[in-house]
Image (cartoon, grey):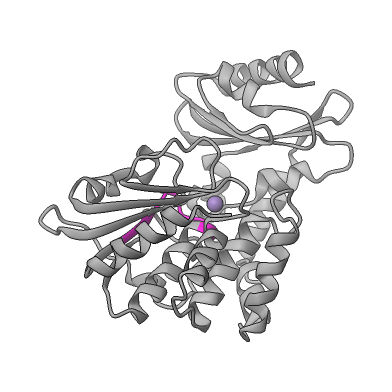
Amino acid sequence: MINKENLKNLDSFVEKSNKIAIMAHADPDGDSIGSIMALREILRIKNKDVDFYINGEIPFNYKFMKDVEKSSSYNINIKYDLCFALDSSDKERLGENSQIIDNSNKTVCIDHHKTNEGYCDLDIIEPDYSSTGEIIFDIFSQLNYEINEIAAENIFIAIITDTGKFIYDNAGYKTFENVSKLLKMNINKNEIVKNLYSSEPKNIFKLKSDVFNSTEFYYEDRVALSLLSQKTLKNYNLSLKDIDGLVERLRDIENVEISILIKELGDNTYKISMRSLGNSDVSKICEVFGGGGHKNAAGFKIENVEYSDLKNNIIKEVEKNAL
Ligand SMILES: [Mn+2]
């Protein structure tokens, strides 16, 4: 349950504001974009003057969302009465947009990351929710703001993507109750699902096939590891921002407990993502390399290392820390 005092304060912040900014973490995903666009619509109906900031390239399967390409570009002279920071566990993850926060009269953070310690005038942190989009739905329903079909569709997108199509642990009965309310609002579910999940360009599919084909298995198939190299990306005329979902797919292979994707950023520079099932804690492995995350999803970045050394070190640390 969201604290009543927080709801009251949020309502009074909104009532007293006209010029409002909305932003979320860098490297946008379904929850960050869905939450931004939902809140924008809810405040637009309230006749607020709303700017929104999507920080980074919008992945191809979210480009169908209404007005998503109308993201503003910030200049230091713009001052806001109120700024919302969504789905971002700390200020740094907002990237370059975080200066908007410093330049706003009042600030509100809405998030569901456990590690969020708050960085705004009002912090609504609810780790029991599936997604930031679901928190927004609950908050503004309770405050009796109008939630139209467009806002409802954006909230649905936030929830379906952050729950891995409703199968992750974070999708409990409350989430299904909220989704049921959204479906009652006549949202265009089939069209959304088709755009999100059945619109993969052929060259992305082919690149993924190559990456899957070269997957290596360790420790009796309990660990799967793949490399996404710049060379493979060039072969298909793609860049890293186009590719999503590889490491999750590797985790879904029979017997695999830990999946590892090594992405080549440049010469001897790599970004590593790990996923796990059940009790294997991949954040412990990533911490060894200066990164971090959650038990079942973590990562790190590393420079000045040869690929073969990096791979061998990771495999060793996997055994020491998580198997
Ligand atoms: Mn989220």
In this rendering, does residue 171 appear at all?
yes
In this rendering, does residue 54 appear at all?
no
* Residue 312 vertical position relative to residue 167 in the rendered view, above or below: above
**Left or right of 317, for residue 71:** left
**Which residue corresponds to the image point at 61% horizontal and 16% vertical from the top-left?**
309
User: For this rendering, which residue is in front, 248 or 212?
Assistant: 248
User: For this rendering, which residue is in front, 291 or 139?
Assistant: 139
* Residue 165 vertical position relative to residue 233 in the rendered view, above or below: below
**Left or right of 143, for residue 70:** left
Reply yes or no: does residue 27 show up in magenta: yes
**Which residue corresponds to the image point at 89% horizontal and 42% vertical from the top-left?**
254
Segment colored magenta: 22-31
Query: Which of the 4 image quarters holds residue 287?
Result: top right
Report the quarter where the N terminus lies: bottom right
Position of residue 229 measured from the top left corner of the image (x, y, whole percent): 56, 39
Report the quarter where the C terminus lies: top right
**Left or right of 143, for residue 13:** left
Position of residue 213 measured from the top left corner of the image (x, y, whole percent): 76, 44
Reply yes or no: does residue 101 show up in magenta: no
* Residue 94 vertical position relative to residue 150 in the rendered view, above or below: above
User: For this rendering, which residue is in front, 271 or 278?
Assistant: 278
Position of residue 191 measured from the top left corner of the image (x, y, whole percent): 63, 81
**Which residue corresponds to the image point at 63% horizontal and 48% vertical from the top-left?**
128
**Which residue corresponds to the image point at 62% horizontal and 27% vertical from the top-left?**
283
**Left or right of 51, for residue 257:** right
User: For this rendering, which residue is in front, 145 or 206?
Assistant: 145
Position of residue 69 measured from the top left corner of the image (x, y, whole percent): 37, 71
In the displayed orientation, state which residue is furthest to the left: 77
Q: How many marks?
A: 0
